Amino acid sequence: MAPHEIDIVYWGIFALAAINGGILVAALLSRKVNQIPNRLLSVVILSMLYSHLVSCLRFTGVGLFWGTQQKWGLPLWTSCSVAIYFYVDAMVTPGFRFERKHFVHLILPLIGVIWASVIGYLGVESHLFQTTQSHRWELGIILSTFGLYFIGAQVRLSSFVSESRNYFSSLSAVRLTWLRIFLILLFSLWAMGVVWFIEGPFGMSWKFLPLVSTMIILVMGFLALRQSTIFFPADEPLKKDVKTVLMPKSETEKIIKRLMEYMDTSKVFLDPDLRLRTLSDELQIRPQVISEVLNKGLGTNFYDFVNGYRLAEAKKRLIEPQYTHLNILGIANDCGFNSKSVFNEIFKRKVGVTPSEFRVRSSPQTSV
C-alpha cells in the first residue's frame, strides 16, 4: 500500500472515531440518568479522540500545530486516568457526589497544565515523543498514572461485586460485565503504551493506538448508553452506624421479627426488582439498620435473605398440584427470580438437587 493510501486509511479511522465519538458524547450528556458518570465518560472519549488526532498528525507527517498539540499529552492523559477511575466509582457508589477530598486527584493534571503552559509560553518543544532516555519521563509519568488509576478502578469494581449483595435481591442488572470489558480494553491500551515506551515512538506499536482507541470509543460508549441507573438518588452508602452496632439484642430481635412478618404477609420477595431501599421505605427502617441487623442478627446479607424466601416459595410451588401447568422457568419467574440459571444455581446449592429433580422426586407418581 502506497504511503498516501496509508494516510487516507488513518484519517478515515480518525473520521469514523470522531463521528461516533461526537454522537456518543452528545447522547451521554443528554441522558437524565447516570449524569455524573456520563460526564466523566465524555471526558474520557474526548481525550481519546484528541490522542487519536495527535497520532494521526504524527503518523501522516502533518506538521500543522504539531508543536502546540504534543505538549498537552501530560495533562490530557493524567486527567483521562482520573476521569476513568471516578467514572467507575460514580457508577457503583450510591449517592455519589464530588467532595473536597476528591480534588487532590487533580493535582497532577494541574501540574501538567502548568508545565504545558510554561513550555508553550517559552516556545520550548515538549519531549513527550522523543526517543532519548533523558526526555521520556513525561510518557513514564502518564503510563504510571494510568496504571495506578486503572488498578484503583479494578479494585473499586471488584469491591462493588461483594457490596451489591447488601443492596439488591437480584444481581443480573448490576453485574456490569460491559464495564469489565471496558477496563480490559483500557488495559490493552495501557499495555501498548508500555511497549511504545520500551521500543520508542518509531516502533510499530504506537501505529496501532488509533485503532485501539477507536474500538474503545465505539464499544464502551454504546454499552454505557444501555446501562440503567444502579442506585437511586435517595440511596446512600451503607456506612457503619454506631447506634446500630451497639443496638441491644432485644431490639435486634424485634426488628428481625418485624422483617420476617412483613416478608410472610406482603410476599414482597416476589418482586424481582426488590432492593434494600424499597424494603426500607416500606418498613420505615433505615437501610443501614436493616443491613446491619441481617449481617449481625442472622449472619446473612440482603440478597441471600430475600432469595431464601423465594426459594421456599419455589419449593412449595414445585410440589403443589395447582402449579403443575407451569414449567421450571415459569415458577422461577413467579417467585421473583429473573434468571433461570441463577435459580438453578441457588436451588442446587441450598437443596442439593436441581429444581427438575426435586419436582420429579416430590410428585405423587414418584411417591407411589
Image (cartoon, grey):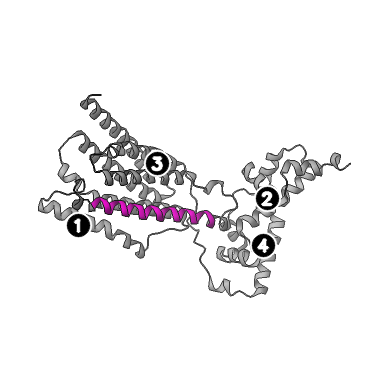
Residue matched to label 2: 349
Q: Which residue is mark 1?
A: 114
User: Of label 2 and label 3, which has the lower sequence position?
Assistant: 3
**Amino acid on which the number 4 mark rests in the picture:** Leu
State whether the magenta stretch is mostly helix, strand or loop.
helix
Of residues 289 and 342, the one nearer the viewer is 342
The span from disc 2 to disc 3 (Cα, nearest Å) is: 37 Å
Q: Which residues are magenta?
A: 138-162
Using residue 42 as the reference point, say whether residue 332 is left or right of it. Answer: right
Residue annotated with mark 4? 259
Structural crowding at the residue carrying mark 3, measured as other residues with C-alpha within 10 Å and reported as few (<14), some (14–19) or many (≥20): many
Q: Which residue is mark 3?
A: 221
Q: Nearer the viewer, mark 4 or mark 3?
A: 3
Viewer-closest of 84 and 26 = 84
Q: CA distance from mark 1 to mark 4?
A: 57 Å
Q: Is residue 139 magenta?
A: yes
Whichever of labels 4 and 3 marks the residue nearer the N terminus, that label is 3
- Write the residue at 32% across / 60% down: 105
Percent from the top left, x then y, of residue 69?
19, 44
Q: Counting residues from the N terminus, which is met first, the one under dot 1 or under dot 4?
A: 1
First-in-chain label (2 vs 4): 4
The numbered mark, 2 or 1, whose residue comes first in the sequence reads 1
Residue 44 located left or right of residue 339:
left
Q: Quadrant of the N terminus?
A: top left
